[in-house]
Image (cartoon, rainbow, N blue to C red):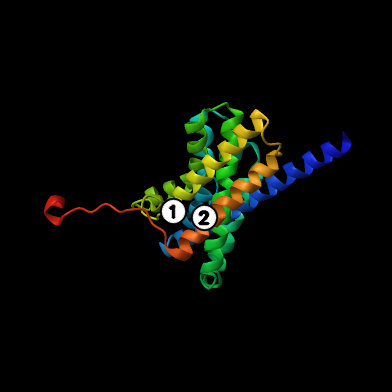
Amino acid sequence: MLDYLSVFIMSENLIFFADLLGTVIFAITGAVSGMRLKLDLLGVVTFGCIVGVGGGIVRDTVIGATPVAVLQNEVYLASCIVTGLVVFLFFKRLENHKRVILICDAFGLGVFTALGVAKGDLYHLGPIGLVLCGAISAVGGGLLRDIMARRIPEVLVNNFYATASLIGGIANIILLKLNKSGYLRLSSFSCFLITTLLVLVIRLLAIHYKFHLPGARVENDYER
């Protein structure tokens, strides 16, 4: 019993650490966007916070999980603020590591997808709700950022970003169903890890091989 409890506590701690790491990674991408838009210090920190915790706020609001998680544990918002400040001060150094940021962003995409599905499962959502919960967690912050920046959200034109999250969400649901039916005996951490790695691999493969979905083709005459 004690061994099982220790494993459970360790798994919960690892998930929390991954969640916090994903939050910081997303905050970095948000703050970097703010720097590229030449915002002031407050703007850069705000963009970092929006991308870092915005998806979770939207998700919790939609499913009625209030107060939202970020307001119950200040460490998430505090980490976003600190991250925004660091990016503001050391932006030039970060610009030299664009590849690393892309890889880390793919990891964060997987983490938030898995956590979003898990949060939806706690509220007994159906399959579609679970997939959307995972996707909102993963891309909601970036969506809000792009709306504030007055541009078409990258998730609608950056192929295999939101798509990778949706695929990961579906895979997570399958794992949950197989677990509940008794065909598999995976821990919550195992499901979380499998989903995170799946989304990570899909996203990195999409970047490397330039996967993309078919784009809309509209004639110029029709546009006018």
The residue lying at 11 percent from left, 54 percent from top is 221
Which numbered disc, 2 or 1, marks the residue that appears first in the sequence? 1
Residue 113 position by quadrant: top right
Query: Label 1 is placed on what type of residue?
Result: Phe
Q: Nearer the viewer, residue 150 or 55?
A: 55
- The crowding category of the residue bearing disc 2, from other C-alpha atoms within 10 Å (few below 14, some 14 to 19, many at least 20), is many
Local SS, label 2: helix
**Rendered location of residue 17, percent (x, y):** 69, 49
Can you say whether 7 is above or below 154 in the image? Answer: above
Write down the residue under mark 2.
202
Q: Position of residue 129 (x, y in %)?
A: 49, 32
Q: Which mark is residue 8?
A: none
Residue at 86 percent across and 39 percent down: it is: 3
Asked if the residue at tag 1 contacts the one at tag 2, i.e. Cβ–Cβ closer than 8 Å, the answer is: yes
Residue named by callout 1: 160
For the point 53% across and 41% down, the residue is 169
In this rendering, does residue 200 appear at all?
A: yes
Q: CA distance from mark 2 to mark 1?
A: 8 Å
> Nearest the camera: 77 or 168?
168
**Within the image, what quadrant is residue 173 found in?**
top right
Provide residue 171's location: percent of width, then percent of height.
55, 42
Q: Secondary structure at mark 1?
A: loop
- Is 156 on the left-hand or right-hand side of 134? left
113 left or right of 154 in image: right
Q: Please state the horizontal and vertical placement of residue 115, each as a whole percent of the image.
A: 60, 41
Left or right of residue 111: residue 166: left
**Is residue 27 something one can see in this rendering?**
no
The quadrant of the picture occupied by the N terminus is top right
Front residue (pair 203, 178): 178
Total tally of numbered discs in the picture: 2
With 151 as the anchor, is 118 left or right in this view? Answer: right
